[in-house]
Structure formats: structure tokens, C-alpha cells
Image (cartoon, rainbow, N blue to C red):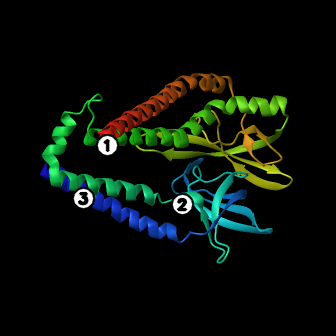
């Protein structure tokens, strides 16, 4: 009991400290306007670790962003660490812009989630106070809790479980599901844009190297790095999905498919890419079922908690 109370107060103070610190960081951008910025150009600064191999962690990318506010056009540059995590040419990025000072920041960097830490801190401190005042009674009520005979501690725990499951489902849908769906649909999107919409032009590109990324536990990913010329201007590009080290060899020429409107490039999907996209629907289906399970658990727990609160108030 003593350890639980101390842990609640410790976590509560830690979350409240993080909330206050992050709130100070986000308060600077209060009143800033949200604008869409377009990456007009990128310049890669590669660090070659060995022959024809690029170290992603030691490299960097300089991106030029263009945006418009109140009829005035702005062009700003920003350096990003690495190559693979940097934005691509033609990509739209939401930013926050201060009209008075002219300062700007990526919208995702200004979101410090201080409200989440504030809620967690308040919950932990409240739990510590309740355990300190009547810990044995609360534990006894939790043990005796039944859906047909609800009590306040059990209903509160049901509500917290529902909120936690709902937050997890939302995080999965917002953060993971779009990438999974994009990777599964990428070969078919290429076929539609090339064969039906005729949006791609074929250009010759030289594979000048392979980007190497180490993600830990001896897991290494490889991405081919291409160089091509359009209207006398030389550009470089790499696909956003990993490929076999032997599929594209440095020093050989390959065909890229470029959208003249946006400047985005793509590779022609192979038969194995189409097969992999179809097979990826299996784990995608399991992931969707997991998200649905979390959502159903959230709705059910919140419904049970609401019924419990209603019966308690009725009494």
C-alpha cells in the first residue's frame, strides 16, 4: 500500500512537471496561424560510409518550404537530420506562422501534448490522495464490484479503462493505419496513375548509391539513391520503402516515373511488389480487427461506467 501511494505521488509530480515545462514551450506559438507549406526543393548532403553506401544517420537534408499568408509569399529553408525522415519534394507540411515576428515552426513540433501530461498528473495525484485517505476501503470496493451492483471506485476504473482503450484506438488509427494502407496501396496507385491517368513521364536515372539505415538489433534497411536530370537541372531521389540490397546496383541506369506537376518520382512495381501488397492485406486486416476490438472495449467500458454512475446517483 505504501509503495503504491508513493508511486502515484511520484508519477503525478513527474507528469505535472512535464506538463508545465511543455506548456511553456507551446505558449510561444499561441496566436500563430496554421498554414500549409509546400516543399519546393530538397538538397541532400550525403555522408558516404563506404563505397557506394550512404550512412543515413550522419547525413542531412535541406528543404525549401513555400507558403502564402495574406497574399504575401514566403520561402524558408530548414535542415532536417538524415535523409529518410526528411520531407520529399512536393510534400505538403502544416506549419505555424507568427505574423508579428515572422517566426515559423512545424506544427507537429509545436504540439507538446502538455494537456495529456496534465491529465495524467492529476489522475495520479488524485489516486494517491484517495489511497492515502481510504486505501483499504477502496481496494475492498474494487474487489466487491459487479456490473449488477456497481460502486463508485469500480465505475471510475471502468471509465478509465474505456478512456485508455479509446485513446489507444485513436492513436493506432491516426499514427499507424495510414502508413500501412499507403504501403499496401502504393503499387496499385502507380498502375492507376500510369495506365489510366497518364500522369507519369519516363526519365533515365543513375543509381549512385545505397542508403543504409540501422534500426537496432542488427536490423538494416536499404534504399536505392538515384540521380537524374530534368530540363538541365540535376536532382536526386530515393523511394520511401526499403528494398533488397541487390535489386538496384550502384552504377547502373534505371527508369524512373516522374509526375511533371508535383515533381514526385516513383519506381515501376514488380510482380513481387504486387504480391507483397496483396499479402500485406492479411496483417492489415488483423490490425483493423485489433483497432475495432479496442474501440468496442472502449465503448463497452464507458457504457458500463455510465450505467454505474447513473445507479449510484439514483440511490
Q: Residue furthest bottom?
A: 101
Residue 77 position, x and y percent, is 67, 66
Q: Residue at x 70, y 62 (%)?
A: 64
Closer to us: mark 1 or mark 3? 1
| Labels 1 and 3 touching (C-beta < 8 A) | no
Q: Residues within 10 Å of mark 3 (few under 14, many from 20)?
A: some
Q: Is residue 89 left or right of residue 50?
A: right
Label located before the other in sequence (1 or 3): 3
Residue 277 position, x and y percent, is 62, 26
Q: Secondary structure at mark 2?
A: helix
User: Which residue in the structure is indicated by mark 3?
Assistant: 10
Q: Residue at x 27, y 38 (%)?
A: 154
- Would you place residue 72 above or below residue 252 in this image? below
Q: CA distance from mark 1 to mark 2?
A: 34 Å
User: Which residue in the structure is indicated by mark 2?
Assistant: 109
Q: Nearer the viewer, residue 77 or 28?
A: 28
Q: Nearer the viewer, residue 294 or 81?
A: 294
Residue 52: mark in rendering? none
Q: Nearer the viewer, residue 10 or 77?
A: 10
If the image is split into quadrants, where does the C terminus sit?
top left
Q: Residue at x 69, y 67 (%)?
A: 76
Q: Is residue 125 visible?
A: yes
Label located before the other in sequence (1 or 2): 2
User: Which residue in the structure is indicated by mark 1?
Assistant: 156
Q: Residues within 10 Å of mark 1 (few under 14, many from 20)?
A: some
Q: CA distance from mark 2 to mark 3?
A: 27 Å
Amino acid at each position: 500500500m505504501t509503495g503504491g501511494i508513493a508511486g502515484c505521488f511520484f508519477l503525478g509530480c513527474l507528469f505535472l512537471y512535464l506538463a508545465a515545462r511543455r506548456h511553456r514551450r507551446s505558449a510561444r506559438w499561441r496566436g500563430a496561424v496554421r498554414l500549409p507549406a509546400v516543399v519546393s526543393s530538397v538538397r541532400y548532403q550525403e555522408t558516404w560510409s563506404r563505397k557506394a553506401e550512404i550512412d543515413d544517420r550522419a547525413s542531412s537534408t535541406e528543404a525549401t518550404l513555400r507558403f502564402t499568408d495574406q497574399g504575401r509569399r514566403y520561402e524558408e529553408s530548414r535542415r532536417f537530420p538524415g535523409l529518410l525522415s526528411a520531407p520529399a519534394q512536393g510534400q505538403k507540411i502544416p506549419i505555424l506562422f507568427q505574423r508579428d515576428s515572422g517566426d515559423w515552426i512545424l506544427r507537429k513540433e509545436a504540439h507538446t501534448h502538455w494537456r495529456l501530461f496534465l491529465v495524467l498528473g492529476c489522475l495520479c495525484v488524485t489516486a494517491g490522495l484517495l489511497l492515502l485517505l481510504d486505501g483499504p476501503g477502496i481496494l475492498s470496493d474494487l474487489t466487491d464490484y459487479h456490473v449488477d451492483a456497481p460502486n463508485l471506485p469500480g465505475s471510475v476504473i471502468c471509465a478509465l479503462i474505456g478512456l485508455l482503450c479509446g485513446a489507444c484506438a485513436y492513436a493506432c488509427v491516426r499514427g499507424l493505419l495510414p502508413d500501412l494502407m499507403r504501403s499496401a496501396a502504393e503499387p496499385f496507385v502507380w498502375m492507376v496513375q500510369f495506365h489510366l491517368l497518364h500522369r507519369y513521364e519516363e526519365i533515365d536515372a543513375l543509381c549512385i548509391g545505397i542508403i543504409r539505415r540501422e534500426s537496432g538489433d542488427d536490423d538494416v534497411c536499404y534504399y536505392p539513391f538515384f540521380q537524374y536530370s530534368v530540363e538541365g537541372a540535376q536532382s536526386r531521389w530515393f523511394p520511401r520503402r526499403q528494398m533488397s540490397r541487390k535489386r538496384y546496383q550502384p552504377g547502373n541506369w534505371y527508369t524512373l516515373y516522374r509526375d511533371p506537376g508535383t515533381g514526385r518520382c516513383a519506381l515501376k512495381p514488380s510482380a513481387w511488389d504486387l504480391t507483397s501488397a496483396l499479402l500485406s492485406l492479411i496483417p492489415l486486416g488483423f490490425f483493423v480487427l485489433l483497432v475495432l476490438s479496442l474501440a468496442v472495449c472502449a465503448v463497452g467500458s464507458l457504457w458500463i461506467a455510465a450505467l454505474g454512475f447513473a445507479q449510484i446517483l439514483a440511490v
